[in-house]
Amino acid sequence: MKTPLHERSLVLVKPDGVQRALVGDIISRFEKKGLKIVGMKMVWADAKLAEEHYDMPKEDKQALGERTIAAYEEKGKKIDKTPVEVAEDVQRRLIKYITTGPVVAMVIEGAHSIAHIRKIRGHTNPLAADVGTITADLTIDSYFISDPDERAIRNLVHASGSPEEAKREIDLWFKKDELHDYDLAIEKVLYSKDWEATRKDLVEGK
Ligand code: GDP
Ligand code: MG
């Protein structure tokens, strides 16, 4: 089995995180975990970048729409649109939200980084998030508050959900020469004295 030792994820501190001066708190959670920031910059996304970022295949739109409709119905609200139409409404709100101010964009690397980062970020809906996660600790927003306002939930951080999503998003936000290769101290701690060789073994899955 190939261990994803150098798995990468695109992480965005969204405009609410920047405006609420939570950038340091958010980044430090990833740093303390032992993940490696290999690229970082502040970007005020234009509509084109935001649209590309939130573009998704039809199946994903269908799934997002179905989830959103189910969440509305749970609250007793009937929706007369198709799941794809509902997903497109959500997408429009997401684009509006992410372009309201600058974001801090990062590429974060490490073994199983996508899964670790998603755990640290917490549930998409802060009301459902476990204590200790970013969405549980740092915001009180919920779909209950955001849906009637017809706005995207302000959940502070975006993090890629899969290796395929990460690749697409990293290529969209970063140029190759904006990503850096260097060693973190934890890599030496975890991978022993002979860590270069160990790393090679891990990558090759020996
Ligand atoms: P994430 O990767 O966990 O941030 O979430 P998704 O990729 O599943 O969805 C992207 C965004 O769509 C979320 O950040 C929410 O703003 C929005 N969204 C997802 N699911 C729902 C839902 O059930 N209801 C509403 N109103 N918005 C949703
Ligand atoms: Mg997502």
Image (cartoon, rainbow, N blue to C red):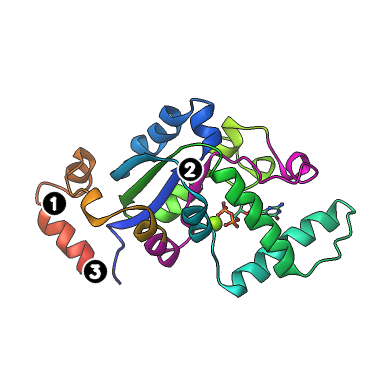
Discs 1, 2 touching: Cβ within 8 Å:
no
> What residue type is disc 1 on?
Trp
Q: Quadrant of ligand 2?
A: bottom right
In the image, residue 5 lies at what x, y percent? 28, 58
> What residue type is disc 3 on?
Gly
Left or right placement of residue 190 versus residue 70 in this view: left
Task: Give the extent of the magenta segment.
Answer: 141-168
Does residue 66 show up? no
Q: Earlier in the sequence, mark 3 or mark 2?
A: 2
Discs 3, 2 touching: Cβ within 8 Å:
no
For disc 3, the neighbor class at 10 Å (few under 14, some 14 to 19, many from 20) is few
Report the residue that reaches farthest toward the top.
21
Residue 205 numbered mark, or none: 3
| Quadrant housing residue 183 | top left
Q: Which residue is mark 2?
A: 120
In the image, residue 38 lies at what x, y percent? 27, 46
In terms of secondary structure, where does tag 1 sit?
helix
Quadrant containing the N terminus is: bottom left
In the image, residue 188 lies at what x, y percent? 17, 44
In terms of secondary structure, where does tag 2 sit?
helix
Decide: is 113 above or below 65.
above
Residue 172 numbered mark, or none: none
Residue under the image location 50 percent in, 48 percent down:
158
Decide: is 201 above or below 154.
below
Q: CA distance from mark 3 to mark 2?
A: 26 Å
In the image, residue 142 lies at what x, y percent? 71, 41
Q: Which residue is mark 1?
A: 195
Q: Earlier in the sequence, mark 1 or mark 3?
A: 1
